[in-house]
Image (tube, rainbow, N blue to C red):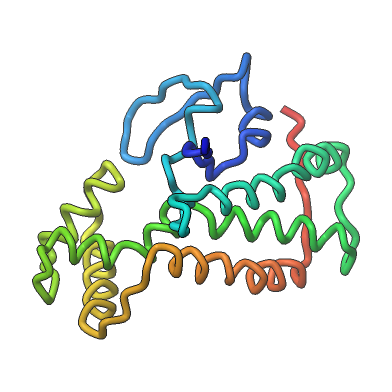
Amino acid sequence: MNRARAHHYVPQVYLREWAEDGRVAVRRRGADHSFVASTSRVAQETDLYTIDTEDGPSDAVEKEISRFEAQLAEMLKTLVGGRMPKRSSADKLRYATLLALQFIRTPDRVEMWTFPNDALTVANGERPVSRKVIKTLLEDRAGYAPQPSEIKGAWEFVNYVVMNDEQMTRNEYLEVQFAGMSRVSEYLVKLNWSMEISRV
C-alpha cells in the first residue's frame, strides 16, 4: 500500500504564504548562503512520523497531522484580516492546538526522544556512550558543529537514559511526544495574545 514518506514539519500551506511561484528562499543554520527551493522540498524529512504496525510501516500519524493542518488556511486568512480569537473561545483553543502541534512536531523534538537509542547503536552498545560518539551524531544529524554545551547536554541525557535502561521503541517515543500536545495547548490558551501586522 502506498504511504506518504515525505513528512513536512512546517505546513506547506504556511510556507506558501512566503513563496513566489511555489518557491521560497532557504538558509540552513550555520550556512552563510541561501538557496531557492519548492515548498514541497523544504521543511520535510523522510519517515519523520512513521510508526511500525503489524501490517508494516504506517503514515497514520502524518495523516492525523494533515487533518489538523486542513484548518490552517482559513485560520491564517482570519489573522491576516486582523481578527484575533477571543479569550477563552473555541477558536483560541484551535489556534493554541495548532501552535502546540508545531512546537512538538519538529525533527529536533522527534530526534530528542530517539537520540539515546541511536547513540547506543553508533557506540556498538558500549556504555557509557562517549562524548566523541555524541559529537559525531549531533554533527551528522544537524549538519553543523555543535556547541560544547550542546554536546554536554546530549551526553548527559543519553547516558542517563541508557544507563537506566529507559529506552523506548520509536512508536513509544512518538506516543509520548504527541501526548504532550494537550499540555502545551492548555498552557498557550491561558496566555494573553497580541498581534502585530507589518505594513512593509
Kindly identify the residue that appears in the image at 21 percent across and 76 percent down. 159
Residue at 62%, 47% (x, y): give it: 63
Q: Quadrant of residue 69 in the image?
A: top right
Residue 124 x/y as whole percent: 10, 63
Q: Position of residue 67 (x, y in %)?
A: 71, 47
The part of the image, by quadrant, that contains residue 30 is: top left
Question: Looking at the image, is 91 positioned above or below residue 20?
Answer: below
Q: Count the marks.
A: 0
Q: Is residue 27 above or below residue 84?
A: above
Q: Nearer the viewer, residue 196 or 123?
A: 123
Rendered location of residue 65, percent (x, y): 63, 50
Position above or below: 41 against 9: above
Left or right side of 143 for 173 = right
Name, please, the residue furthest toward the top: 21
Tell me if 75 is positioned left or right of 187 in this view.
right
Name, please, the residue furthest toward the bottom: 164
Residue at image point 25% right, 72% down: 158
Q: Quadrant of the C terminus?
A: top right
Q: Nearer the viewer, residue 160 or 148?
A: 160
Estimate the x, y position of residue 57 in percent, counting from the top left.
Answer: 44, 50
Determine the residue positioned at 87% across, 69% down: 88
Query: Residue 105 vs residue 101: left or right?
Result: left
Say left or right for 117 vs 136: right
